[in-house]
Image (cartoon, rainbow, N blue to C red):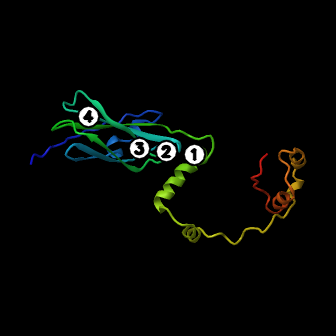
Amino acid sequence: MKTSTFSFVFLITFVSGLDPANMPAQEALKLQIRSQPDRVQLQWQSKIPLPLSTSVARYQIQRSTDLANWETVGETVAGRMGISDESLQTLVARGGSQAYYRLVGQVGSGSVKASGGEVFGYGSAFARELARLGQISPGQFAALYPVPGDYLKSLSFDPTTAQYWAAFNADAQFRLNDDELKLFKQNGFVVSERPR
């Protein structure tokens, strides 16, 4: 049985305002290579610090047989938005009996929806917590995060006495019905699903 030896080098390219002097490449990535009969599995632990919660690290694998000429192989591998410490991997076709591999990483902005946790940075914190906890049932969630007993039962003032309440309530599009008004006075807010 013939054993193939694979060598590797890696290079990291930075974009979007990251200063490579602030992060030694050797500490950022450790590329592991596993040879399979017709392909190569490449795996690395990405630890590139992301400047914003909406940033994402994208990686491309390049291969060379002579360390002078490099070609991009496989698809771009993108990390999760706002997550700077995660394990990533990809499979690429073998490039002969011996090849060198390098990893080119870029940090850029991820696609952000017009609203949601990503806009305010909650998305990445939620993803980290979900990765730590895993999927849990509502009962497990309630046991981990019990409701404190010190919430007020109702407001101690009438919110309809607020400065702009009369102007808000005058608009038929926003006017609360009797049930909604009762909840608003009790809680200080109301959620309505009726069309406006």
- The structure residue drawn at horizontal position 21% and vertical position 43%, both measured from the top left corner, is 38
Q: Of the two numbered discs 4 and 1 on the same chain, state the one appearing first in sequence.
A: 4
The residues bearing labels 1 and 2 have C-alpha atoms spaced at a distance of 9 Å
Visible residue check, residue 60: no
Amino acid type of the residue that numbered disc 4 sits on in the rendered structure:
Arg
| Alpha carbon separation for disc pair 3 and 4 | 22 Å
The residue singled out by tag 2 in the image is: 81
Q: Mark 4 — residue?
A: 63
The reply to whether dot 4 and dot 1 touch (C-beta < 8 Å) is no
Closer-to-camera residue (72/144):
72
Viewer-side label of 3, 4: 4
Q: Residue at x 90, y 45 (%)?
A: 170
Is disc 1 in contact with disc 2, using a CB cutoff of under 8 Å? Answer: yes
Residue with the most extreme top position: 69
Mark 1 — residue? 118
Q: CA distance from mark 4 to mark 1?
A: 35 Å
Q: Nearer the viewer, mark 3 or mark 1?
A: 1
Q: Residue, x 88% and y 55% (percent of image)? A: 160
Q: Earlier in the sequence, mark 3 or mark 4?
A: 3
The C terminus: image quadrant: top right
> Residue 180 lies in what quarter of the image?
bottom right
